[in-house]
Image (cartoon, rainbow, N blue to C red):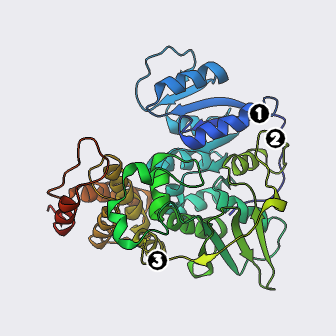
Amino acid sequence: MINTSSFCEAKKKIAVLGSTGSIGQQALDVIRAFPTRFQVISLAGGRNLELLERQIREFQPKMLYSSIKPNFTYKGKFLSLEEIANHPRVDLVIIATSGKAGLSPTLAALKAGKIVALANKEVLAMAGEIVTREASLHQAQILPIDSEHSAVWQCLLGEGSKPRRLFLTASGGPFYNYPQSQLSQVTVEQALHHPTWKMGRKVTVDSATLMNKGLEVIEAHWLFTIPFENIEILVHPQSIVHSIVEFIDGLAKSVLSFPDMKLPIQYALSYPERLPNPELPRLRVEQIQSLSFEPVDYGKFPCLKLALDAGKQGGTYPTVLCAADEVAVELFLNHSISFTDIPRIVQKTLEHHKNIAQPSLEEILASDAWARKYAERVSLVSYEVYPKRSSFCHCEERKRRSNLRVIR
């Protein structure tokens, strides 16, 4: 899927979709470090208008998108995400939006033959076959920004044969060592406190449920055309080894680095070059005391198994998975459900979905819309949140979990 042929331009014109999110801000940090190599030609932000305005003042983009009407003046062009993504002046599009919002501009960019630096996991999970087909048809490149997929990509550079197995590493998130009985009491604040990575709210919760790792397996399947049964997950708390690629002769290659998203972002922007950036953290190999790996506990984190099963079944199941998870995570972030209710809602939605084996884009979008409505109808009754606490009342929590039902 990823073309490793060389290309180099003196100054790449970059559109950053999702510029006010975590990945978008870190991408702008990288771009800021190389003013003679990269130019921000377009910014697309969300609801953080104050930050978007500051970004506009600094980078002076020619094109702009905002999910809500801005309260400031802007001299450039207001365009849709799709119009920005396929604009002839854009060389590379960073897809740093969250969830379904990244799908349409990704397809627009690929159809225009652009380089797509992809950070949005749902794009390939929802419509991997369609997305990779469009990239191949229009000779467009998808360069991964995820640290795990960037590591696999770099391990495969220069290799003439496909790998035997891929190992994607996972930190395990903040709750990997929690007893099962304690997970229902996890608060939003605890879930948003990831031990290693700096990420957006939705991705951080997905990392805590390990849904994120399941989506990464689906991504890897499409990016590198690797069967699901040849992709494994290892818990690696140190987050230094980002992936391991095993070849048919038994040799294994891995990529090690300090856990900082700016490293894979910079490589996607500068590929095939590596640029010196003194602002990026260096891994001090001599200070590494140990690297540990262990099999993942699928029983403790049902979101992971739900994601893997949906990916293997294919069709519209991964689309429904992504949509239901997006709804459930938002409910959790709004203190409307408990942490352990997230997989319940996703599972319930998947169980009631009628799969379409070879969906069109229209059928994928229709399945997404259906799943969102269905997940929203999954109701948890009789709950209470204490006014000055983020955790749920224990007695009400037990009552709510026993009354999970679907409003038909």
Percent x, y for residue 44?
54, 33
Image quadrant holding the C terminus, namely bottom left
Closer to the chain start, of discs 2 and 1, is: 1
Marks 2 and 1 in Cβ contact (< 8 Å): yes
**Left or right: 153 in relation to 186:** right
| Three-letter code for the amino acid on which mark 3 is drawn | Tyr
Relative to 26, is 308 above or below?
below
Which residue matches tag 1? 33
Residue 380 shows in this picture:
no
- Report crowding for label 2: few under 14, some 14 to 19, many 20 or more residues within 10 A (C-alpha): few
- Report crowding for label 3: few under 14, some 14 to 19, many 20 or more residues within 10 A (C-alpha): few
Viewer-nearest of discs 1 and 3: 3
Percent x, y for residue 232?
60, 77
Relative to 170, is 20 above or below?
above
Kind of element beneath mark 1: helix
Kind of element beneath mark 3: loop
Kind of element beneath mark 2: loop
Which residue matches tag 3? 298
